Image: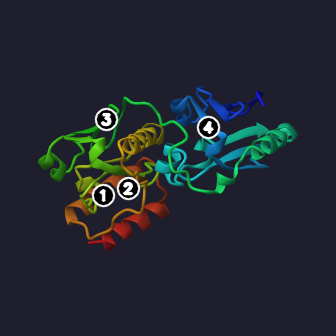
Amino acid sequence: MGDVLAGIHATWEFEPDAVLIRFERGIRAPKLYQALRERRVPHEALASVTLSPGRRGTVVLHAVPRAGADPLMEAAAGQLKDACDPYRLVLPAERETLAEYYADELRARLGPEAKERADRFLVAAPEAPLQFKAYDGKASFDGGQVAFRWFWTGASSAKWKAGDQTFSVRELSGVEWRSPDVFDGYLRLLRRGHHPEPQADQDPAAVVFGLGYGPVHESLPFAAAVLAAVRDAGGEPVPVGAAVTAGRDPAVIAERIRHLGELYQAGLVTDEEFAAKKAQLLAEL
């Protein structure tokens, strides 16, 4: 194709065997877009292409990636909001005919493997070094090792007792990322031969998010980079899954309720969300 389609917050350049997505870095662009800058998506990494009406006089061209093809989407595991989906190109409605043309062109390039899970990552992961601040510590990744350095203001006594942690990607089987957009978000490293602690705030192989810590645009690229490194090291990445549930220590419950109160006071949760979550935590005592 060799053409360029400019949308809101991103531009797609159509190469013979891939789509090069360049993200806008302006103040109005989603922060995840700004962090990613650009991504090259081979046609073989796509499962389907759709065009649908958007909001406020727009249309949305959506290239859906194959399962297992993109470490970023594997780490996200369906938790990204539409506004942050790097595979969505939002265009003014008057460009619908042009968008439909490119959608058809892309569909014509999808092979029979499009519906199958990819056996390797086909889209490059964000490059190390990467780091971000979580609620209870600082996480850094140099491409071969992940390091957690605890903050005395947020880390649990269990983490202080364990001390600062360093993990080689060769000892990992995957990464579990729970979005910071939810109350109990975290990033957990899954270690070979180890069963994770029931709660991330007690697990020295995890950092917890909260109230401005571990934002999506920092922690998700971090998780994707670690997943890709685990695969390169010969491991089998395990994306985010359901959180481990178990009875909690009363002190942990009290700390979670305190944190929930901070979110409520900051206006980040509604009255109904606050009451429901508090009741859920108390029920676990």
Q: Report which residue position mark 4 lands on.
A: 41
Q: Report which residue position mark 1 lands on.
A: 256
| Label 2 secondary element | loop
Rounded to the nearest whole Å, what is the CA distance between mark 4 and mark 3? 25 Å
**Residue 35 in view in this figure:** yes
Q: Position of residue 248 (x, y in %)?
A: 25, 67
Q: Earlier in the sequence, mark 2 or mark 4?
A: 4
Q: Position of residue 7 (x, y in %)?
A: 73, 33
Q: Which of 250 and 76 lies nearest the eye of the viewer?
A: 76
Residue contact between numbered discs 2 and 4, judged by CB atoms under 8 Å: no
204 left or right of 12 in image? left
Q: Earlier in the sequence, mark 1 or mark 2?
A: 2
Q: Position of residue 174 (x, y in %)?
A: 36, 51
Q: Earlier in the sequence, mark 1 or mark 4?
A: 4
Rounded to the nearest whole Å, what is the CA distance between mark 1 and mark 2? 9 Å
Q: Is residue 74 above or below residue 17?
A: below
| Label 1 secondary element | helix
Work out which quarter of the rendered image holds the N terminus and state it. Answer: top right
Q: Report which residue position mark 2 lands on.
A: 184
Total labels drawn: 4
64 left or right of 118 in image? right
Question: Disc 3 residue type?
Answer: Gly
The residue sitting at 56% across, 55% down in the picture is 117
Q: Which of 92 and 250 lies nearest the eye of the viewer?
A: 92
| Label 4 secondary element | strand
Mark 2 vs mark 4: give the one in front. Answer: 4
Q: Earlier in the sequence, mark 1 or mark 3?
A: 3
Rounded to the nearest whole Å, what is the CA distance between mark 1 and mark 4? 40 Å
Residue contact between numbered discs 2 and 3, judged by CB atoms under 8 Å: no
Question: Disc 1 residue type?
Answer: Arg
Q: Report which residue position mark 3 lands on.
A: 144
The residue sitting at 18% across, 40% down in the picture is 164
